[in-house]
């Protein structure tokens, strides 16, 4: 079968690598892709949000399956658009994508299904005064979340009542555009975070390997938030007992909630979790895979991913087996100097040929006159396996030295806290 993959990051290179290992894959197209995805298929310069152009491409290339990397096309309703055209999409319907597209929607959903999450209230301009009073009665830190998609920047953790009140006013006055027309104010949960990924067909589900990502730019988890500087899988503190709680209190009620609302959902659910006193709480839902979590989760999936996707489309996920690699996977992200703030692009990347014992997953790269150059903040993810996390990390860090580009930066403490 011919497959189209949407997106251009490390997540998508990893997916492209995995999809093309399937004997079911005849030809892979990636829109728009990067220098890494081009090793596995044909990059097409089409935006993942341009459904009409994607449709034309599908007709032209006889594509019957679209795998969606990022959230935006899903929140914009790509599933619903192609459902009418008889082209299968791995991803939720527009309503299902609201679990990520609207924090308020997700909160109401969790409340209804009794899924453990932080206490909250939502406010709009019309209820701003009540919001300010609500904050005045709280003990900091206070968590403010823009309801809509805000490019990963819509969550603020305020250390004082003053700061939280000022931020609420500014969010309701358009700090994040229409994304912050509604603001969710949440109780602060103090604990350690981890990520659980589920592939569901709306009835059945498979739990994928658990992962932890490292979000801050600086070592010791300091400095600005990024898309993610590295990830590990499995996660030592997420033991069987904790996963059982996650499954019974969170995953199963989530699937039941989708069914109760008659939501079509044939794709990934990424559950951002926090462990507080050994109990799991949901921090957020995403309707897609994580990046860089995919760079450790997908390599640990031994099963044929297209077989899993086909079973998802046919609502027969209960009939396939998910086989997982036992070894530990880690990924270390090499980023452009200045990221997550301003950085330069177009730096020549050298040393890719010197990498041994790691997978190279391209994120922000492109090919310019036969040369691979940087084309984004996150540039290359180096994924390695080991019998122990230390062994895996040693490979990734050796190779992080081999790859050179002007301004290269990476965190040297991925996985060191565990
Ligand atoms: P989100 O975009 O919802 O994942 O939030 C971004 C980050 O903010 C999370 O990864 C957490 O580190 C933090 N965060 C979000 N909600 C809370 C909360 N209720 N308590 C503590 N930290 C939170
Ligand atoms: N690494 C976090 C995310 O993909 O949202």
Image (cartoon, rainbow, N blue to C red):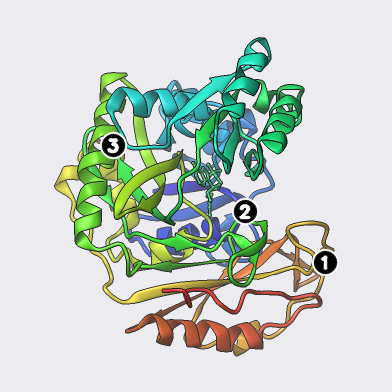
Task: Give the labeled residue for mark 1.
Answer: 346
* Residue 392 is at least partly visible in this image: yes
Q: In the drawing, what numbered circle is on residue 274?
A: none
**Measured from the top left, where is residue 366 in percent x and y?**
72, 63
Of the two numbered discs 1 and 3 on the same chain, state the one appearing first in sequence.
Answer: 3
Q: Quadrant of residue 222?
A: bottom right
- Residue labelled with disc 2: 8
* Residue identified by numbered label 3: 201
Q: For the point 40% across and 51% down, which residue is it?
A: 274
Q: Is mark 2 within 8 Å of ligand 2?
A: no
Q: How many marks?
A: 3
In contact (CB < 8 Å): disc 3 and disc 2: no
Query: Mark 2: which secondary structure?
Result: loop
Q: Nearer the viewer, residue 222 or 235?
A: 222
Name the residue: 58% across, 59% down: 215
Residue at (44, 29) in percent of width and height: 106
Q: Who comes first in sequence, dot 2 or dot 1?
A: 2
- SS of the residue under disc 1: loop
């Amino acid at each position: 079968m011919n497959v189209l993959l949407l997106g251009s990051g490390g997540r998508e290179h990893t997916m492209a690598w995995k999809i093309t290992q399937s004997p079911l894959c005849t030809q892979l197209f990636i829109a728009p892709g990067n220098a890494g995805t081009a090793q596995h298929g044909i990059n097409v310069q089409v935006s993942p949000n341009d459904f009409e152009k994607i449709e034309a491409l599908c007709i032209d290339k006889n594509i019957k399956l679209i795998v969606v990397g990022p959230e935006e096309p899903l929140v914009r309703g790509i599933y619903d658009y192609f459902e009418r055209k008889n082209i299968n999409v791995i991803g939720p319907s527009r309503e299902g994508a609201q679990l990520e597209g609207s924090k308020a929607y997700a909160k109401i959903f969790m409340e209804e299904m009794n899924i453990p999450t932080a206490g909250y209230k939502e406010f709009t301009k019309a209820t701003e005064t009540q919001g300010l009073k609500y904050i005045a009665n709280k003990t900091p830190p206070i968590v403010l979340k823009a309801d809509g998609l805000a490019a990963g920047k819509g969550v603020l953790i305020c250390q004082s009542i003053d700061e939280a009140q000022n931020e609420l006013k500014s969010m309701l006055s358009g700090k994040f555009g229409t994304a912050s027309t509604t603001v969710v104010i949440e109780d602060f949960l103090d604990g350690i975070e981890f990520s659980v990924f589920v592939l569901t067909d709306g009835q059945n589900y498979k739990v994928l390997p658990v992962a932890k990502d490292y979000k801050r730019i600086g070592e010791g988890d300091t400095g600005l938030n990024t898309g993610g500087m590295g990830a590990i899988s499995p996660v030592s503190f997420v033991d069987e007992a904790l996963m059982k709680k996650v499954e019974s209190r969170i995953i199963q009620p989530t699937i039941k909630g989708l069914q109760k609302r008659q939501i079509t959902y044939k794709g990934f659910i990424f559950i951002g979790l926090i462990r507080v006193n050994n109990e799991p709480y949901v921090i957020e839902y995403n309707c897609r895979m994580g990046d860089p979590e995919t760079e450790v989760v997908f390599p640990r999936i031994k099963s044929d991913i297209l077989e899993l996707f086909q079973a998802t489309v046919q609502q027969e996920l209960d009939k396939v087996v998910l086989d997982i690699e036992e070894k530990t996977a880690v990924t270390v992200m090499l980023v452009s100097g200045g990221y997550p703030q301003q950085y330069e692009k177009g730096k020549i990347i050298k040393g890719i040929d010197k990498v041994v014992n790691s997978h190279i997953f391209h994120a922000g790269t492109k090919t310019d006159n036969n040369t691979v150059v940087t084309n984004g903040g996150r540039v290359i993810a180096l994924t390695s396996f080991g019998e122990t996390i230390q062994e895996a990390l040693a490979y990734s860090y050796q190779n992080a030295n081999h790859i050179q580009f002007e301004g290269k930066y990476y965190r040297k403490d991925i996985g060191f806290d565990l």
